[in-house]
Amino acid sequence: MNFQQLRAVREAIRCGFNLTEVAGVLHTSQPGVSRQIRELEDELGIDIFVRAGKRLTGLTPPGEAVLPIVERLLLEADNLKRVGDDFNAQDTGRLSIAATHSQARYALPTVVRDFRKIYPQVTLMLHQGSPKQVAEMLLSGEADIGVATEALAHYPSLVALPCYRWTHSVVVPPGHALLDIEGPITLEQLARHPIITYETGYTGRAHIDDAFTKAGLKPDIVLSAMDADVIKTYVELGMGVGIVASIAFDAERDRTLRALDARHLFEINLTRLAIRRGTWLRGYVYAFIEAFAPTLSRSVVERALAGEIDES
């Protein structure tokens, strides 16, 4: 048994059982991948994959049992390499961060800038996606850290730690009727206007939907997007009223818009930072995490990875 055999099994599953694609990922030949898988199956005395002729079509029940063990072995192999790298080149390496657009655009920039000043030899890679995609990048090992508001806490294989709470704002053009209302706006008043907000699954959209549903209202959502800048652009064009994360509005930058506080309308949102459970983190990763969320010191993160503290 060797790690190349284990990688062939893992990548076969990740690539949808397409061995040509697996060969490309592992920089080998398709017959070589098939041989690695068959040799491991022969050694274990089981069929890991269901076959139709020479094609792999799925996992057998023994394969389902083997897969998490393969994942753990490969994770620990990566951890061993990280330990060696951390002692041999403490301030040199790579840090891959997966985040939603809102986090990448509004929450991370100053942290990335300050981190680069302290760790100029660390190469940063920033991936953007939906909360589900962020979680998948963490689980596959493509990302070291994930930052998102929704979904991360729903994956048992991830340690998802709370970072900060935030609210929504309503954005409108100057002179809009909602600006003439005395006192806080209500959901009923908001629902009288066409609404532009986030796609389902992004940036607290679930809390927006829940609030209208509980109030017995059906808002006219004329456009949804994953990007607050896109939402604000269409509000500027007069297409509707925008609901965005408060962090996405800057009075100096967004001079053509006005913001109304909506914290009383929608439930407060919680941004989380997630790490794959069982991962050994290099020293500079802990430094980045603490720079982003000062409450997440190295000792707190280590205790969370060890299962010693509540992640809620």
Image (cartoon, helix red, strand yellow):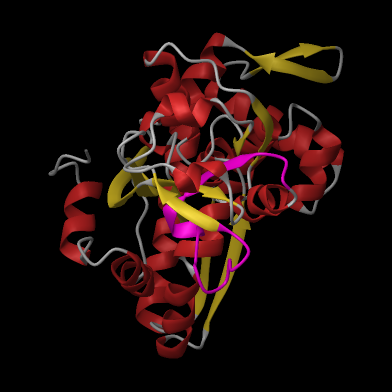
Q: Is residue 118 above or below residue 224?
A: below
Q: Is residue 308 above or below residue 94?
A: above
- Residue found at the far left of this picture: 308
Residue drawn at point x = 35 percent, y = 62 percent: 281
Residue drawn at point x = 74 percent, y = 27 percent: 16
* Front one among 249 and 141: 249
Q: Is residue 250 magenta?
A: yes
Snapshot quadrant of residue 208: top left
Q: Position of residue 52 (x, y in %)?
A: 83, 10
Q: Quadrant of the N terminus?
A: top right
* Front one among 176 and 142: 176
* Highlighted magenta segment, given as a residue range: 238-257
Query: Does 264 sit left or right of 46 as displayed?
Result: left
Residue drawn at point x = 32 percent, y = 72 percent: 291
Q: Position of residue 224 (x, y in %)?
A: 66, 35
Regarding residue 8, the answer to whether it shows in the image is yes
Magenta: predominant secondary structure element? Answer: loop
* Front one among 310 and 171: 171
